[in-house]
Image (tube, rainbow, N blue to C red):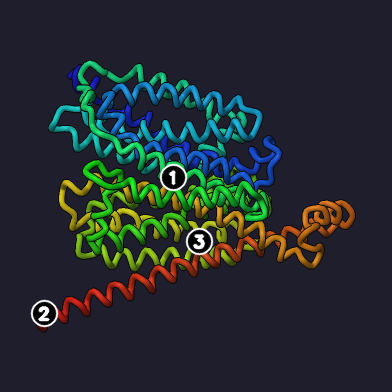
């Protein structure tokens, strides 16, 4: 009995550490407007705080397998968890933007290593007959954490301030590590698996330079800046060197999995849809707080409502949905997501609670129908030995493209603000005129809020149209596959 309880406590402790890692992907979303003030940023430029973490996360996922095979899953898990807690404290103490962004990048890198190795550690905490149960706890922690992020971030920021979003990682991780019984966990490392270091280097350079272009392009006036120009050139060169290096038996990415049409179609749909969803998860709270004027806790509840519905429904969909219904679920999810974003495009400064919540509830339903069936659909025809490579590519593309979508969406809003406010000022003097007129005319601030709302709503409408386009492409691909199958039968 004692052994079982000890194993359960260890399992929950590992899940808690994995939970903290994924929580950090979204916990600062609602707090960005407040953090932007402390770092002397416009809230629409504070997306760097999110994308720096995501960039590090993508790179961390790439190197996790090799580091674990060399040094052992348990060693990597413990060391990186402690280092993650230390870096989190440094993030909370940082008063300058550049050091903070570099620390967030390192935090994301360590998070990728911890998440990847935590799956092995949590399985080893349980006896073989209970390992499926352990995996279900791990999967729930990984899936549920991002859904709670905005709400947790809102509560902590309003209560004690945003630095505690990072300070709290230290006691949580230390207590969780102390609760794990490492004696019963086998450390399988010290296998010298070859790593394609040139390919890893070039793909890391590509991700970092491309993210720099997207995040800082608007701020530095795009290609008028030598920094942006050379970063774009470096991104182009590095991606060419990556494909040249990614050859031989130790490929970093095995692109052969894309030969499976079902995996290609499913992955493209997930990557595109996920990018829009993650970008919206950042854009919506900025509008709710900065323009609509909602308190941070209420904004967090509205943003988290869709994710909570998705998290509650996803396990039932994953358990009871049959494989033959995956295609129908994909079509239905894209329709619901498109409609929910279209509804968000009708938000206004006079919208009530019901008007704010209904599109988010629809979004939650769409999310539940989107992720679980599409992931299962994309992996359905792959051989067992291809699953690891397929998961690595899928996760990497999702993280990288979501980061890019955040940068592009925020840049689009900044430009739309200038256009919508063109009645009051020329684009070159937009921010000066905005400050000047708001201080003189009593109704100027309301008019600027209306123009800001118009800019955000256009982006929501574009998201809805993008999902409608995904639906059309899916429909065409599905129809062409049906025609090919019928032609084969006739022949």
User: At 54% across and 39% down in the image, what residue appears?
Assistant: 28
Q: Which residue is mark 1?
A: 147
Which residue occupies the foreground of this view, 227 or 190? 227
Are dots 1 and 2 in contact, CB under 8 Å? no
User: How far is disc 1 from disc 3 in space, using C-alphas?
Assistant: 16 Å
Alpha carbons under labels 1 and 2: distance apart: 46 Å
Position of residue 101 measured from the top left corner of the image (x, y, whole percent): 57, 35
Q: Quadrant of the C terminus?
A: bottom left
Which class describes the residues within 10 Å of circle 1: few (<14), some (14-19), or many (20+)? many
- Rendered residue at 27%/58% (across/down): 258
Can you tell which quarter of the image residue 248 is in?
A: top left
Task: Count neighbours of disc 3 (C-alpha within 10 A) and say few if under 14, some if 14 to 19, many if 20 or more.
Answer: many
Q: Residue at x 80, y 63 (%)?
A: 426
Q: Gap in Å between the C-alphas at discs 3 and 2? A: 44 Å
Q: Which numbered disc covers residue 359?
A: 3
Residue 365, horizontal then vertical, whole percent: 39, 58
Q: Which of 48 and 252 lies nearest the eye of the viewer?
A: 252
Q: In front: mark 1 or mark 2?
A: 2
Which of marks 2 and 3 precedes in the sequence? 3
The tag on residue 489 is 2
In the visual, does 430 lie left or right of 47?
right
């Amino acid at each position: 009995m004692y052994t079982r309880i000890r194993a359960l406590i260890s399992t929950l402790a590992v899940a808690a550490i994995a939970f903290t890692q994924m929580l950090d992907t979204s916990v600062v979303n609602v707090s960005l407007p407040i953090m932007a003030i402390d770092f002397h940023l416009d809230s629409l430029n504070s997306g760097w705080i999110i994308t720096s973490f995501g960039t590090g996360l993508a790179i961390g996922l790439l190197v996790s397998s090799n580091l674990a095979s060399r040094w052992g899953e348990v060693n990597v898990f413990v060391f990186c968890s402690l280092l993650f807690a230390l870096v989190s404290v440094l993030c909370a103490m940082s008063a300058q933007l550049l050091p903070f962004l570099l620390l967030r990048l390192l935090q994301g890198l360590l998070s990728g290593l911890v998440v990847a190795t935590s799956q092995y550690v949590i399985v080893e905490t349980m006896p073989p007959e209970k390992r499926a149960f352990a995996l279900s706890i791990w999967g729930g922690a990984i899936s549920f954490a991002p859904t709670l992020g905005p709400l947790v971030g809102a509560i902590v920021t309003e209560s004690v301030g945003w630095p505690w979003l990072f300070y709290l990682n230290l006691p949580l991780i230390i207590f969780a590590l102390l609760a794990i019984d490492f004696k019963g966990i086998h450390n399988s490392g010290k296998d010298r698996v070859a790593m394609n270091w040139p390919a890893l280097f070039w793909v890391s350079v590509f991700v970092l330079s491309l993210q720099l272009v997207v995040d800082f392009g608007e701020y530095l006036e795009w290609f008028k800046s030598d920094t942006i120009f050379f970063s774009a050139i470096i991104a182009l060169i590095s991606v060419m060197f990556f494909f040249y290096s990614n050859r031989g038996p130790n490929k970093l990415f095995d692109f052969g999995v894309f030969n499976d049409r079902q995996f290609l179609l499913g992955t493209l749909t997930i990557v595109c849809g996920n990018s829009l969803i993650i970008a919206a998860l950042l854009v919506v709270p900025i509008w709710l707080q900065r323009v609509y004027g909602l308190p941070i806790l209420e904004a967090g509840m509205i943003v988290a409502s869709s994710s909570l519905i998705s998290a509650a429904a996803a396990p039932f969909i994953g358990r009871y949905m049959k494989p033959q219904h995956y295609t129908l679920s994909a079509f239905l999810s894209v329709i619901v997501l498109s409609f929910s974003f279209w509804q968000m495009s009708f938000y206004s400064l006079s919208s009530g609670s019901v008007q704010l919540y209904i599109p988010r509830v629809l979004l939650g339903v769409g999310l539940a129908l989107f992720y679980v069936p599409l992931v299962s659909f994309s992996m359905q025809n792959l051989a067992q030995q291809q699953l690891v490579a397929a998961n690595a590519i899928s996760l990497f593309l999702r993280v990288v493209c979501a980061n890019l979508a955040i940068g592009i969406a925020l840049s689009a809003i900044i430009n739309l603000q200038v256009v919508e406010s063109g009645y009051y000022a020329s684009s070159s003097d937009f921010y000066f005129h905005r400050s000047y007129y708001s201080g003189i005319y009593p109704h100027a601030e309301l008019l600027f809020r209306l123009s800001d709302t118009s800019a955000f709503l256009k982006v929501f409408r574009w998201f809805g149209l993008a999902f409608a386009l995904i639906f059309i492409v899916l429909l065409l691909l599905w129809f062409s596959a049906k025609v090919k199958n019928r032609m084969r039968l006739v022949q």
